[in-house]
Amino acid sequence: QVQLVESGGGLVQAGGSLRLPCAASARFFSMGWFRQAPGKAREFVAALNWSGGSTYYAASVKGRFTISRDNTQKTIFLEMNSLKPEDTAVYYCAAKSGAYSSSEADYAYWGQGTQVTVSS
């Protein structure tokens, strides 16, 4: 059974940083991060293709967030800097076969989510 496990969430002040790891029980072609704020739909944050290491970001986080991987090819990270109150959400790790996608419908595997709260 495939498992994705996120961690690293918490409470941080605006302007602060957090790093979210996601450990997978299998290797995937692409992995990414989505987030869901209260009362809003889940939205794409960032994704990474293992082959070549190409990365993709939502416009709202580009330049502040960085997605990366470790050498095991089973763990990705989301480094979040210059956090804003509007970044408050539950952050989900997701994985899929094939190339990256920003659509949550294309991802077959999901973690349980980790809460990130940014105070003003």
Image (spheres, grey):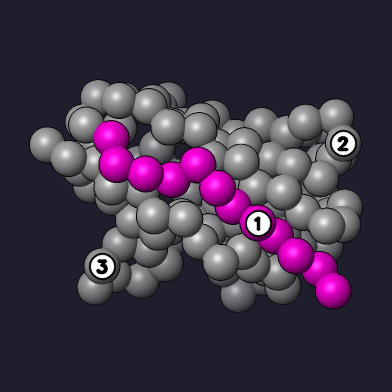
Looking at numbered disc 2 in the image, what kind of residue is underneath it? Thr
Q: Where is residue 51 in the image (x, y as percent from the top left)?
A: 86, 39
Q: Horizontal and vertical percent for residue 86?
A: 23, 47
Q: What stretch is highlighted in magenta?
A: 1-12
Calculate the distance from the C-alpha at mark 2 to the C-alpha at mark 3.
34 Å
20 relative to 18 in the view: left or right: right
In space, the residues marked 1 and 2 are separated at their CA atoms by 15 Å
x, y percent for residue 80: 43, 32
Residue 77 in the magenta stretch? The answer is no
> Image check: 97 left or right of 78?
right
User: Dividing the picture into quarters, in which one does residue 52 lie?
Assistant: top right
Mark 3 lies on residue: 38
Nearer-N-terminus badge (1/3): 1
The numbered mark at residue 72 is: 2
Task: Name the disc covering residue 101, or none.
Answer: none
Q: Residue 17: where, in percent of width, then height?
A: 38, 27
Question: Badge 1: how crowded within 10 Å, few (<14), some, or many (20+)?
Answer: some
> Would residue 99 be visible to someone looking at this image?
no
| Circle 2/circle 3 CB separation < 8 Å | no
Which tag is nearer the camera, tag 1 or tag 2?
Answer: 1
**Callout 3 secondary element:** loop
Vertical order, 28 against 71 (above or below): below
Asked if residue 2 is among those painted magenta in the image, a careful observer would answer: yes
Helix, strand or loop at disc 1?
A: strand
Q: Is mark 2 on a helix, strand or loop?
A: loop
